[in-house]
Image (tube, grey):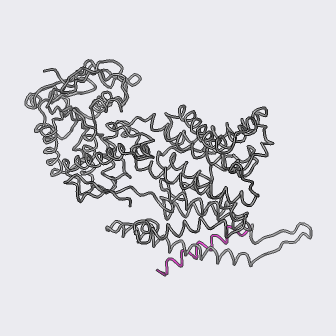
């Protein structure tokens, strides 16, 4: 089975700094894949390249959206077009729309699946009214899945931190993706919140058939969730494999803990 | 409330002000008779004044703190206006009363009053247009008056050269302004915040300077005179009747503007604008086309300025570049900021505050800018969101199970 996301030889230079160096990563349908590495290893840069925020210096990025699986290149696409093609992401430092309500945040996620234009907005013709109705219903449905319905009319900035992270996931899910990119979803969460996040991610994968690529520092979460793990350090991929393989990989241990100095 | 420390602080403030203003308020040198006049009375006034002001200030600050603590404790802090709009029993009668006042206004009051009202309502239109650009899409546009000028000159020039009537010029002016909005929008797509403000400021000045210096095109600083007032073909109006006619016309246009802006802000496009204002990166990552969204905001915002420009030209029958200086932009911006960004009612209140009050207090016109400054500072401290801050639409989901999502506007 061909992977739904295939990244080959991805290189990203910022001036003289090589943030990513010939990275190969792939995600198969129904997988939860983790991307780990020390701080500054280039994980978020990798996300930014795939989602079109930074155009990569070199490399190929191809998606195959199930069920048709026609290969599509991501190179040179703007972020909004990447999202339209079924990749949705969250951000490391929460980037919600703080003075919009929770429901509206999710509604924004569905923006690219809707058609209403200026004339529709002013005249509110039948098609627009139905689209709006359907939109409200769908967005509420997403909130139900994520478990945020009790905040529906609350402003996003008034939500507790953990719920804001979940809202970001809800917003990303509203774009109707086949692959969800989560950038440190558990950052700043307490153990209980992390546990419920763990359940949520598995639920998204199993019930919504959305594959997941996540960056995470919480090793407990990574090890329990992921089917496969990629490790990057200084922009290079240093290891890949199952959680068990990664745990015992000497290169990974070296990258995380440093080399032992001989006495 | 009345604690000793507060009295002491206020007292210190007043002493400090007496010291500061001593050289200019107390000493006066009479150069003719070469004597120094000591005006100790002034010192007393300054002292007493600053003491009272400082005390009132402290009192308000304390109240504000108590208020924000209440809000944190769960009580929502809504303005009087918002509570008013939620209470349907009060809202509809109030709306009715306002409509009656608006309709009867020109029949009861003098021409002078009607003229003031027309200019106030024109600014409501301008404010609502700018509100799309600044309040909703968050694009700080300091050259908004340029679109106003485009509308006004579109009517004036088309009428001068081709005898185009007001009614045809109105949509043309609006369309031209929208086009100029897009022309301005393209180069500034990548800019944000301060940089955007500077470029739009420059754009506004460019338009004004072109109008001032390109004599063959715009007749330069001497402007264009004898622009016909809007009228119904076949009916001869006296000046008085015509003013009343323009008044009703502007009222209709304002109602139309409110209707459209209200619909826009809770639509797919309106939400995209707000998302753009809140976070540009996230907005694009969620699948919103940034370019398109920005350009529609510029174009739709400019449209209203174009229309207001045509009305302005028709009302005054004479326009020249002096009417379209940067001060007009600043004024419209103040209306939006003071009234409440992203809030329609706020803009209406703001326009009333900034246009009507100065007209009625012409006797104090020297202190106008002083009062503006004070008003803006007070607003920033006590109501940072504006007099009436924008509220988001809320939805209710009692019947969501059977697929009936009812929504209501709060």
**Residue B289 on image: x %, y %:** 40, 34
Q: Residue furthest front?
A: B234
Say if A214 sits above or below B73 in the image: above
Q: Residue furthest left?
A: A244
Which of A112 and B18 lies nearest the eye of the viewer?
A112
Position of residue B8 measured from the top left corner of the image (x, y, whole percent): 54, 78
Marker count (numbered) = 0
Q: Residue at x 54, y 65 (%)?
A: B99
Q: Is residue B166 left or right of A235 when viewed as pictured? A: right
Q: Main secondary structure of the magenta part?
A: helix
Q: Nearer the viewer, residue A190 or A104?
A: A104
| Nearest to the observer: residue B384 or residue A149 | A149
Q: Quadrant of residue A111?
A: top left
Q: Position of residue B16 (x, y in %)?
A: 62, 70
Whether the magenta-drawn stretch holds residue B10 is answered as yes
* Residue A149 to residue B106: above or below: above
Q: Left or right? Give the position of B222 relative to B74.
A: right
What are the residue bounds of the magenta stretch?
A: B1-23
Q: Quadrant of the C terminus of chain B?
A: bottom left
Residue in view at x 44 percent, y 46 percent: A123
**Residue at the location (74% across, 56% down)?**
B237
Name the side, left or right, on which B172 lies relative to A108. Answer: right
Q: Nearer the viewer, residue A151 or B121?
A: B121
- Percent x, y of residue B56: 55, 75
A187 part of magenta stretch: no
């Amino acid at each position: 089975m061909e992977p739904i996301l295939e990244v080959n030889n991805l290189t990203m230079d910022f001036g003289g700094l090589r943030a990513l160096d010939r990275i190969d990563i792939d995600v198969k349908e129904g997988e939860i894949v983790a991307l780990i590495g020390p701080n500054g290893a280039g994980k978020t840069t990798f996300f930014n390249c795939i989602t079109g925020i930074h155009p990569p210096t070199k490399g190929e990025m191809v998606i195959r959206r199930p069920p048709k699986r026609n290969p599509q290149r991501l190179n040179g696409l703007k972020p909004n077009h990447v999202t339209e093609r079924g990749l949705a992401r969250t951000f490391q430092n929460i980037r919600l729309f703080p003075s919009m309500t929770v429901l509206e945040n999710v509604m924004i996620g569905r923006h690219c699946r809707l058609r209403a234009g200026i004339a529709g907005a002013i005249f509110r013709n039948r098609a627009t009214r139905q689209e709006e109705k359907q939109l409200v219903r769908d967005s509420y449905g997403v909130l139900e899945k994520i478990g945020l319905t009790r905040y529906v009319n609350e402003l996003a900035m008034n939500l507790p931190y953990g719920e804001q992270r979940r809202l970001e996931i809800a917003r990303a899910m509203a774009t109707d993706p086949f692959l969800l990119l989560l950038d440190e979803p558990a950052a700043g969460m307490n153990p209980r919140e992390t546990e419920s996040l763990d359940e949520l991610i598995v639920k998204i994968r199993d019930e919504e058939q959305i594959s997941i690529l996540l960056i995470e520092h919480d090793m407990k979460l990574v090890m329990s969730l992921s089917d496969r793990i990629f490790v990057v350090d200084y922009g290079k991929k240093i290891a890949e494999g199952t959680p068990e393989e990664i745990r015992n990989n000497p290169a990974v241990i070296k990258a995380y803990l440093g080399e032992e100095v001989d006495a | 409330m009345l604690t000793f420390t507060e009295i002491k602080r206020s007292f210190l403030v007043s002493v400090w002000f007496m010291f500061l203003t001593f050289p200019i308020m107390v000493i006066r040198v009479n150069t003719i008779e070469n004597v120094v006049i000591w005006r100790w009375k002034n010192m007393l006034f300054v002292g007493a004044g600053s003491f009272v002001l400082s005390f009132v200030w402290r009192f308000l600050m304390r109240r504000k703190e108590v208020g924000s603590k209440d809000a944190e404790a769960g009580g929502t802090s809504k303005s009087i206006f918002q509570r008013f709009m939620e209470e349907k029993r009060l809202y509809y009668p109030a709306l009715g009363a306002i409509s009656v006042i608006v309709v009867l206004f020109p029949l009861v009051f003098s021409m002078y009053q009607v003229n003031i009202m027309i200019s106030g309502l024109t600014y409501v239109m301008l404010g609502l247009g700018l509100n799309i650009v600044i309040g909703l899409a968050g694009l700080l546009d300091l050259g908004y008056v340029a679109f106003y000028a485009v509308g006004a000159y579109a009517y004036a020039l088309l009428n001068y050269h081709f005898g185009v009537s007001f009614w045809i010029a109105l949509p043309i002016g609006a369309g031209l302004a929208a086009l100029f909005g897009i022309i301005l929008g393209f180069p500034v797509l990548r800019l944000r915040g301060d940089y955007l403000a500077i470029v739009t400021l420059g754009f506004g000045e460019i338009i004004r300077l072109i109008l001032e210096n390109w004599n063959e095109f715009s007749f330069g600083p001497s402007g264009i005179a004898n622009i016909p007032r809007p009228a119904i073909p076949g009916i001869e109006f006296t000046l008085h009747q015509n003013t009343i006619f323009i008044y009703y016309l502007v009222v209709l246009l304002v109602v139309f503007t409110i209707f459209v802006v209200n619909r826009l802000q809770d639509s797919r496009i309106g939400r995209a604008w707000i998302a753009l204002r809140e976070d540009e990166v996230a907005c694009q990552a969620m699948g919103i086309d940034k370019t398109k969204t920005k350009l529609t905001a510029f174009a739709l915002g400019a449209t209203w300025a174009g229309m207001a420009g045509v009305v302005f030209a028709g009302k005054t029958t004479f326009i020249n570049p002096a009417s379209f200086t940067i001060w007009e932009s600043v004024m419209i911006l103040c209306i939006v900021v003071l009234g409440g960004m992203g809030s329609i009612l706020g803009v209406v209140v703001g326009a009333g505050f900034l246009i009507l009050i100065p007209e009625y207090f012409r006797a104090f016109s020297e202190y106008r800018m002083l009062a503006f400054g004070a008003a803006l500072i007070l607003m920033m401290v006590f109501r940072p969101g504006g007099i009436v801050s924008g509220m988001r639409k809320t939805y209710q989901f009692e019947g969501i199970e059977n697929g009936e999502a009812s929504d209501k506007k709060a």
